[in-house]
Image (cartoon, grey):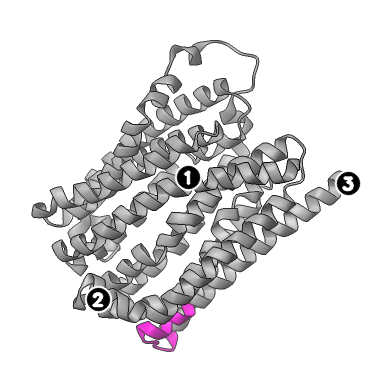
Amino acid sequence: MSQKLTLSRYWRDVVLQASGNSVAQVIGLLGIPILARLYHPQDFALQGIFLQVVMFLTGVMTWRYEYFFQLLSNSYQARLLFVWIIKLGLFTGALLTVIAYLFGKDIATLFGAEGLGGYLLLAPLTAFSISIALGLQHNVQREGRFKDSSASEVVGKVSYVGSGLLFSPLGTIGLVVTSLFSALGKICYLRKRLFELLSVEVCKKSDQEHPRTLHSKGANAMVLSHVFSTVSGAAPIFFISYQYGVQTLGQFTMVMGTIFLPSGLLGLAIGQVFYQRAAQNFQEGKDIRFLWWETVSRLLLFGFPIYAVAVAFSGYIYPLVLGEQWESAGQYARVFSVAAFFSFISTPLDRVSLILRINIYLPLIHLLRMITAGVVMGLAVFHEYSFFEYLIGLTCQMSILYFLDMACGKFFLNKKQQAYEG
């Protein structure tokens, strides 16, 4: 009875989080056809490159400490960690802004996107805002306040689409600033928790170990894995731009922005609740393997029909919904749906190693992702693959790594439980 009640509460929180994600994604889906008609494929290509830069900076700006709120034992430690994140982010953000000002055009040229140069000044600010928004979301999730977390997703998506519409007369920059306004929207909604975390109580002395010290090894591992992950994720973007052209990149960027929507809708919600509940149960000495299996079974139940439809009908849906100029994106989505399916199953469970404090794992799996992504690009150049052939190789590489990641998580859980029982 107790286990059933626990699962009932678990899925109640998933539904609560997913409801906010659902509304947010509906807003995003309604906004995409409009934005696709207001902006050109080249604009989406530049936005894709800009977001890769922002995601990289997000990982190093606050040293990924925002991901450790779930592992904190009390609110006092949460206040200490949040203040540390702000101090670290302000320092690194100022430094990175100076670098962007001095070398932004050179960096953009290196990426094969000369038109992006001036916009890179916004990258540090965008990354800092995303880190703060993530920290606030993780903190309310740690407290089990998934209603606030889900509502912030809605506000963030409204801010994303709204800013894209509002600034569309300005051209490319209107699309570039959407992620910044999305993060600012979340921060504004969670402002009450922001003020609580910035209260003067953080200055009081305590015998508790500072969370930045307590989780420094995990943070170092997260940053290293983030660097490898960002490189492996960004490399195909830049490779496509160089090897196949900006037009092809624009089509692929649209696929990336849409085919993973189910992950943002259900996968993200399940992953957020799983992380919070699994971390809590592990700290209490409970076996979390049953929760892992229950989560995998539901992910398969939801994910398979969604992506089966995507494989079968994306070629018709994309030009119908987005316009005839996106016909190629529909064909690419039919192939890439396979990788998106494995991402949907694996990604919500990818923080098992954090919970179990196996710090070396994340850098290793993302290093393997980076190396194998490079191998696929090397094969594409050596054998002169067409873009479609390269996309098949990329899909296979990503799918295998997602499956391996999930299998490793289960292996770690079994080993940890055997150690407890022994």
The amino acid type of the residue labelled 2 equals Leu
Residue visible at 49% across and 33% down?
140
Task: Provide the major secondary structure of the magenta segment.
Answer: helix
In the image, is 378 to the left or to the right of 205?
left
Q: CA distance from mark 2 to mark 1?
A: 31 Å
Q: Give amino acid for label 3.
A: Glu
Residue 320's disc is 2
Label 3 neighbour load within 10 Å: few <14, some 14-19, many 20+: few
Instruction: Compare marks 2 and 1 and give the one earlier in the sequence.
Output: 1
User: Which of 117/320 is in front?
Assistant: 320
Q: Indicate which disc, 3 or 1, sits on the residue closer to the N terminus.
A: 1
Q: Which mark is residue 355?
A: none
Amino acid bearing label 1? Gln
Q: Helix or strand or loop: what does disc 1 sit on?
A: helix
Q: Is residue 317 above or below residue 418?
A: below
Q: From the viewer's perspective, is 270 left or right of 252?
A: right
Disc 3 to disc 1, how far (Cα)?
Answer: 34 Å
What numbered label is drawn on residue 17?
Answer: 1
Q: Is residue 388 magenta?
A: yes
Mark 2 or mark 3, which is nearer the start of the sequence?
A: 2
- Residue that badge 3 annotates: 421
Q: Which residues are magenta?
A: 382-393
